[in-house]
Image (cartoon, rainbow, N blue to C red):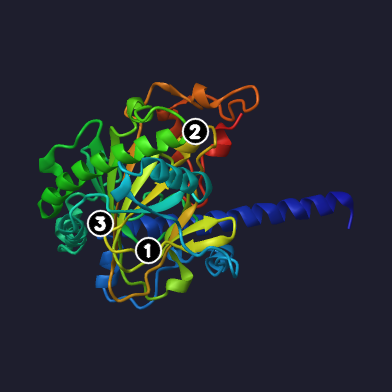
Amino acid sequence: MSEVSLRRSVLELSVSTINCLLFFWIIKINALTKVDETKVGVKGLIDSGIRTIPPFFVHPPETLADLKRGAEPGSVQEIPTVDLAGVEDFRAGVVEKVRLAASTVGFFQVVNHGIPEELLRRTLAAVKAFHEQPAEERARVYRRDIGKGVSYISNVDLFQSKAASWRDTIQIRMGPTVVDSSEIPEVCRKEVMEWDKEVVRVARVLYALLSEGLGLGAERLTEMGLVEGRVMVGHYYPFCPQPDLTVGLNSHADPGALTVLLQDHIGGLQVETKQGWIHVRPQPNALVINIGDFLQIISNETYKSAHHRVLANYSNEPRVSVAVFLNPSDRVRLFGPLPELTSTEKPALYRNFTFDEFMKRFFTKELDGKSLTNFFRQ
C-alpha cells in the first residue's frame, strides 16, 4: 500500500470512528433528556420497578475497578474525631486536633457540637420525607437552576459526566441572599430553617478553631464572610439493584471553604487518604466536616482538601444526608493565599481570583475527580 493510500485509509477510519462516537453520544443525550424530563429522579426509576440500571448509569471499568481499592492493610481506618465539649476549657488541645486533621486528612467528625439530637433526627427525616413524596409533588421544584433558591434534580452534572450517579438532590440557597421561605417545600421547611441556624453557629466555632490553627486571630476567617455564602443540599440515595456498576456520588473535592455534613446510619461515604480509600463510618449524633479547595488555597496549602465519594446504596433502606457548603459571600472580591501565611521561604502557591471565576470553573467540568487547586496554582 502506498503512503497516500495508507493516509487515506487512516483518515477514513478516523472519520468513521468520530461518526460512531457521535452517534452513541447522541443516543446517550437523548436518553438522559428523556429521563430528566420525567422529573421523577432516580427515586422514580426505583418506584417503576426496574431490576437493572439504565446504561448511562454504568461507569467506566477504571472507575469500577477503583471502587474496590481500599486502604492499605495496617493503615489508619478512621478519620479523626474532635470532641467540642472541651472547646473552652481545653481550647489549645482542641485547636491542635482540628489543625492536625485539617492539614492531613482534610476530614474529621465532631461530637458534642451542641445541636439537639432531636433536631438531627428531624432534619434527616424531613429531607427523606421530601424525596418520598408523590412524584408530582417533587416535580414542582424540579429544575436545573437555583434561580428561585430551591432546586430538585438528579445529578447536577448529568449532561457533563461520563456516567450518571445513583442519587437525587434538593438544593436550597441559604445565603447571602436567603431564599423566600415560601419556596421551600412545606414538608421540610421548618427543619431546613432550624438546621441552617444551627450550622451557622457550629461553623463559627469551627472557623475560629481553624483560624487559630493557622496562627491567626480567631475571627480572621469569619471576617472574610466565609459563613455567609451557604447552600444546603439534601441527598437521597435509593436502593440500587446493581451497586457494583455505578456510584452514589463521583470522587471529587468540594470547591468551597468548608462543608458541614449530617449523615444517617447507612454509610457509604469514603475519603481518599495517602493510604487509600477509607470509610467515614457514621457515628451517632456526629457531624462530618471537610476542608474545601477554597480553604486549601487561602491557607496556602496548610490545610488540605480531600477527594471523597459515596458508594451506590446496596441497602434496602435509602441513605439520606444533608450537607451545607460554606462559601464566601462576596463573589467579586479578589481572593488568594492570605498574606500572613506567605513569606520568602513559602511564597504564595496560588494566584488571585474572584469566587465567581472560581465557581464558573468548577461547573465547566463533570464532577468526577474535579479539583480546582491545580487550575489556580502559580
**Residue tagged by mark 3?**
39
The image shows residue 91 at horizontal and vertical percentages of 36, 41
Q: Residue drawn at (28%, 32%), measured in percent from left and top?
A: 228
The image shows residue 317 at horizontal and vertical percentages of 28, 73
Q: Secondary structure at mark 2?
A: loop
Q: Residue drawn at (25%, 56%), measured in percent from left and top?
A: 39
Q: Earlier in the sequence, mark 3 or mark 1?
A: 3
Give the camera-side residue of 353 and 17. 353
Outermost residue toward the front? 89
Give the CA distance from mark 2 to mark 1.
34 Å
The image shows residue 170 at horizontal and vertical percentages of 26, 51
Q: Amino acid at mark 3?
A: Lys
Q: Residue drawn at (48%, 31%), measured in percent from left and top?
A: 298
Q: Amino acid at mark 1?
A: Trp
Q: Quadrant of the C terminus?
A: top right
Give the camera-side residue of 86 and 321. 86
Q: Earlier in the sequence, mark 2 or mark 1?
A: 1
Left or right for 315, reference 40: right
Tag in front: 3 or 2: 2
Mark 1 Cα within 10 Å, few/some/many (few <14, many 20+)?
A: many
Q: Secondary structure at mark 3?
A: loop
**Residue tagged by mark 2?**
299
Tag in front: 2 or 1: 2
In the rendered view, tell whether residue 378 sits above or below residue 115: above
Give the CA distance from mark 3 to mark 1.
15 Å
Q: Are marks 3 and 2 in contact (CB under 8 Å)?
A: no
Q: Quadrant of the N terminus?
A: bottom right
Q: Earlier in the sequence, mark 3 or mark 2?
A: 3
